[in-house]
Amino acid sequence: MDLATLLQRCRGGDELAWEALVRQHQSRVYGVALHYVGNAEDARDVAQEIFVRIYKKLDSCSEASRFLPWMLRIARNACIDHIRRRRARPPRHDIPAQEMNDLASSAPGPEEQWREDSRKRLLHLAIQKLSELNREIILLKEIQGLSLEEIASMLDIPVGTVKSRSNRARLELARKVVALSGARYGAENAGS
């Protein structure tokens, strides 16, 4: 079923259509939430909140072609709200940023999987060390695949600003990855 039909049926109160819509987009929404809040448990809670907001505001998204950016804007805003609430009432202890260790795949062997997981952890750690603005640009452009125009509209800034921020964000990410991988390589060789 195409997205336009699915959205129309959801607006009409079709519970099966809503369930299908959630299933189609739950991993993307969870991924956005995880990148913003940095904790798997909080990300699941925020993802549920995002879908509640989407359900309540579904009538405001009239075009199926605009659904993805609209949904991601709601997701971003919900994540920012969550972060603000968390800062207002910080937890008793720090929440570890590296909770993305569940990326195992059955295809490669254990050694290949370890290398791949290590690279993913390194990238995730580097993304977490980016400035908030650069992390958001990387998330929206490189991970979620939004166009420069969609990001500009979402963040309410000019497209040229998005381009320059995107380039700076990718450069900062590259520097963080190199620095972190150099630190890891040095630590591994020190133990030899």
Image: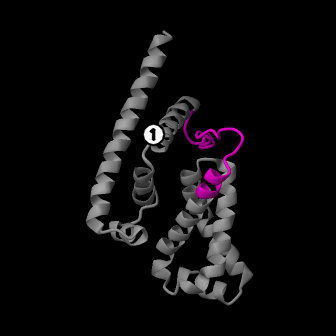
Residue at position x 28%, y 60% in the image: 163
> Could you tell me what secondary structure mostly forms the magenta stretch?
loop
Q: Quadrant of residue 140?
A: bottom left
In x, y percent, where is residue 61? 53, 83
In x, y percent, where is residue 43? 64, 54
Indicate how the structure is coloured in the image.
one colour
In x, y percent, where is residue 171? 31, 44
Give amino acid for label 1: Ala
Magenta region, residue range: 83-109
Depth check, front residue: 48 or 158: 158
Is residue 105 visible in this depiction of the protein?
A: no
Category of crowding for the residue at label 1, using alpha-carbon neighbours closer than 10 angstroms: few (below 14), some (14–19), many (at least 20): many
Depth check, front residue: 8 or 49: 49
Residue at position x 48%, y 85% in the image: 63
Decide whether residue 105 is among the magenta residues: yes
Decide whether residue 93 is among the magenta residues: yes
Count numbered badges in the picture.
1
Quadrant housing the N terminus: bottom right
Residue behind mark 1: 126
Residue at position x 43%, y 70% in the image: 154
In x, y percent, where is residue 178? 36, 32
Residue at position x 71%, y 87% in the image: 13
Q: Residue furthest top?
A: 192
Is residue 176 visible in this depiction of the protein?
A: yes
Question: In screen coordinates, is 27 left or right of 122?
Answer: right
Task: Give the structural element (helix, strand or loop) at label 1.
Answer: helix
Relative vertical location of residue 165 with respect to residue 105 in this rendering, above or below = below
Relative vertical location of residue 100 with respect to residue 112 in this rendering, above or below = below
Question: In screen coordinates, is 172 left or right of 16?
Answer: left
Question: In screen coordinates, is 134 left or right of 160?
Answer: right
Relative vertical location of residue 107 with respect to residue 134 in this rendering, above or below = above
